[in-house]
Image (cartoon, rainbow, N blue to C red):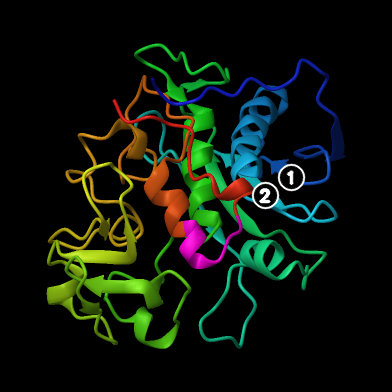
């Protein structure tokens, strides 16, 4: 069987205008278009809401709390380029820095109630498929898939290492402190070295039989040369290519393809980071 499909209930979305270019959807989602290229957010809210529901079906969150998500839908670089981005907000002065979403889920506290937990951008010029049934045409990019991917980063599957391979020395994140060199290997060096950061042998320590092929740590995308925005913060492209259920958090998403389940590896990583999961279930996706 393939990835699960989420179809939101057929109830009207409650979009509360904030001003001419911003709306609030329910309690947990704020959408804006800072350049005014989007004026009707209904279709975006539908697809983004579907993606958030998938994550809420996996992560156990105290019912008095909600993840606060903010997307700015604006012109980036047009169809087929940068689809979007998203990252977590952190509390300052901590080591390791902990995503605000993780603080809510793990510690059941909202330390910044007036702040979103994650923030990102989506390209308003992309040829989006706004449906939630997983059936984009060959020329469309499935928005729900992209948002699922970006929220995965917002939850904390993201590296603080930059193009200079130096930031990891100054800012430890809950992701970066779990990096190891080699499957079942030793801790990654601090500061990160170019040889390790581009050596195609970097793993997230989790020891999971996530693909049904034996217990391994999660191999990360660490090519040479270093790719800012992609390296270390994604699953390795080639390693997980044979496993469709693990495709969501690879560095490249394919036009015309829909992936509506984060897969076993990424949800296991989030569990290692500290996220409680509903019933301990990692994924409903079956490897083909």
Q: Quadrant of residue 80?
A: top left
- Residue 285 vertical position relative to residue 116 in the rendered view, above or below: above
Relative to 147, is 44 above or below? above
> Circle 1 sits on which residue?
30
Please name the residue shown 22% across and 80% down the image: 186
- Residue 78 lies, in percent from the top left, at 41, 32
Residue 69's place in the image compared with 23, above or below, is below
Q: Is residue 17 left or right of residue 61?
A: right
Reading the image, the residue beneath label 2 is 70
Q: Residue at x 57, y 17 (%)?
A: 131
Q: Is residue 132 left or right of residue 125?
A: right
Assess disc 1: are there few (<14), some (14-19) or many (≥20) residues with their C-alpha within 10 Å of its C-alpha.
many
- How many numbered marks are there? 2
Q: Is residue 219 visible?
A: no
What residue sits 68% from the left and 61% below the top? 105
Where is residue 123 drawn, in percent x and y? Answer: 50, 37
Q: Position of residue 2 (x, y in %)?
A: 39, 22
Q: Nearer the viewer, residue 135 or 283?
A: 283
Which sits in the foreground, 107 or 174? Answer: 107
User: Label 2: how many residues lie within 10 Å, few (<14), some (14-19) or many (20+)?
Assistant: many
Q: Secondary structure at mark 1?
A: strand
Q: Quadrant of the C terminus?
A: top left
Q: Which residues are magenta?
A: 270-276
């Amino acid at each position: 069987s393939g990835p699960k499909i989420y179809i939101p209930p057929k109830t009207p979305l409650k979009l509360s205008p904030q001003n001419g270019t911003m709306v609030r959807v329910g309690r947990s989602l704020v959408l804006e278009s800072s350049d005014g290229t989007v004026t009707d957010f209904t279709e975006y809210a539908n697809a983004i809401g579907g993606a958030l529901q998938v994550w809420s079906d996996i992560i156990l969150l105290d019912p008095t709390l909600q993840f606060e998500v903010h997307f700015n839908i604006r012109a980036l670089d047009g169809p087929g380029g940068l689809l979007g981005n998203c990252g977590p907000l952190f509390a300052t002065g901590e080591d390791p820095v902990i995503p605000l979403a993780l603080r809510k889920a793990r510690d059941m506290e909202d330390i910044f109630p007036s702040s979103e937990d994650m923030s990102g951008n989506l390209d308003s010029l992309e040829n989006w498929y706004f449906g939630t049934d997983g059936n984009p045409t060959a020329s469309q990019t499935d928005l729900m898939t992209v948002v699922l991917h970006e929220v995965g980063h917002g939850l904390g599957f993201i590296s603080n290492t930059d193009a200079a391979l130096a930031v990891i020395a100054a800012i430890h994140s809950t992701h970066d402190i779990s990096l190891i060199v080699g499957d079942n290997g030793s801790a990654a060096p601090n500061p990160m070295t170019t040889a390790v950061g581009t050596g195609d042998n970097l793993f997230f320590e989790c020891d999971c039989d996530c693909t049904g092929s034996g217990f391994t740590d999660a191999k990360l995308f660490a090519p040479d040369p270093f790719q800012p925005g992609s390296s270390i913060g994604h699953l390795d492209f080639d390693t997980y290519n044979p496993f469709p259920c693990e495709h969501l958090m690879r560095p490249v998403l394919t036009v015309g393809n829909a992936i509506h389940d984060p897969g076993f590896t990424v949800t296991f990583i989030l569990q290692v980071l500290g996220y409680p999961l509903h019933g301990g279930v990692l994924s409903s996706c079956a490897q083909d």
